[in-house]
Image (tube, rainbow, N blue to C red):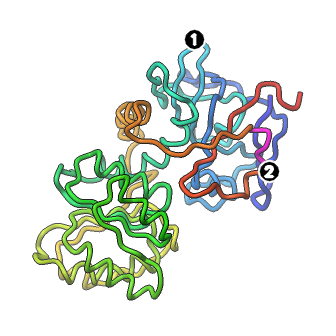
Amino acid sequence: MYAAVVRSYQESPKFEAIDLPEPSGAHDAVVDVLAAGLHPRVRSQADGSHYASRGELPLVPGIDGVGRLPDGRTVYFAAPDTAFGSMAERTVIDVRLSVPLPEGADPVQIAAAMNPAMSSWVALRRRIAFRPGQSVLVLGATGNSGQMAVRIAKLLGAGRVIGAGRDPERLRALRAIGADETVSLAGDPETAARRVGEAAAEVDVVLDYLWGKPAELAMVPLLKRRSDRSRALTWIQIGSVAGPEAAVPSAALRSANFRLLGSGQGSVTTAGYMAELPALVDAIADGRLSVNAVPVPLADVADVWGTPAGAGQRIVFVPTRGAGA
């Protein structure tokens, strides 16, 4: 069979023949892969830079996908923690890490949307006791996951959502998907941080996809402007597009009721993730959440891997049976 195969972290995956591992666990099953999304997490998996990288080569990348089980059921699955992922004509899954799709669900849309949606969905549903009516700042709202976070915060009942990001066109578009206010992060970083403080001082939750300097600079201006510093503010660190490190000022932790935590692989149990998947699948399948999915034949993986998708798009690889045979 054929798959996208990484043999060096310095090179893009190549479409080539590879043996399918034999199912070995009591809950293992072989699925025909219908669609697998090219998420930022998958890119970092393929270049070895992700914090959960196993350092094992060769590697078939892909952390999730949509597949068809031998009994004909179509499922969304999270790939097991092995070196053989979802970007293949067939793969081995643990059926306990899968959920059936509703009748008529689009495999490409599910494969495109689940990963960017999962980060904010799980953060608000599993990392905190989020209550309808609370307000949310999405830091990095012009990225794909940040845009989805705006939608999800509203879907889960946020009373007010503020989106902060650099891209002016995508920032303007946030209004149409639920943002009540937007803040530009363009220009001088300290000036941008003050704008965040002015606009978002009264939020209850920050969903942070940036980290790095933007987060570091925004914390104190945001906290200083709160009308009641004893009212809880929870900062959830999800992504690190702007850098892997941020110096957290000690004053931020002492001078306000400020809680800083992360949400990602390891901070939520597998059971916790799986419990959220059916409701999230339903929200995507019925159109309440969506992304601009771009299906690409898996055989073209080497050609498109290094080319970023357009604004708001998510590339989804669709295996072609017998390609290259």
Left or right of 182: which side holds 298? right
Q: Which mark is residue 71?
A: 1
Q: Specify the segment rendered in magenta.
A: 298-302
Asked if residue 67 is positioned above or below residue 161 in the image, the reply reads: above
Mark 2 closeness class: few <14, some 14–19, many ≥20 residues within 10 Å: few
Q: How many marks?
A: 2
Q: Is residue 261 visible?
A: no
Give the vertical position of 161 relative to 125 (above or below).
Answer: below
Residue 64 lies, in percent from the top left, at 56, 39
User: Which quadrant of the structure image shows residue 29?
Assistant: top right
Query: Residue 74, relative to residue 50: is it above or below?
Result: above
Residue 214: image location, x then y, percent? 42, 78
| Residue type highlighted by circle 2 | Asp
Horizontal relation, residue 145 to residue 152: left or right: right
Q: Amino acid at mark 1?
A: Asp
* Vertical side of 211 occupied by 56: above or below: above
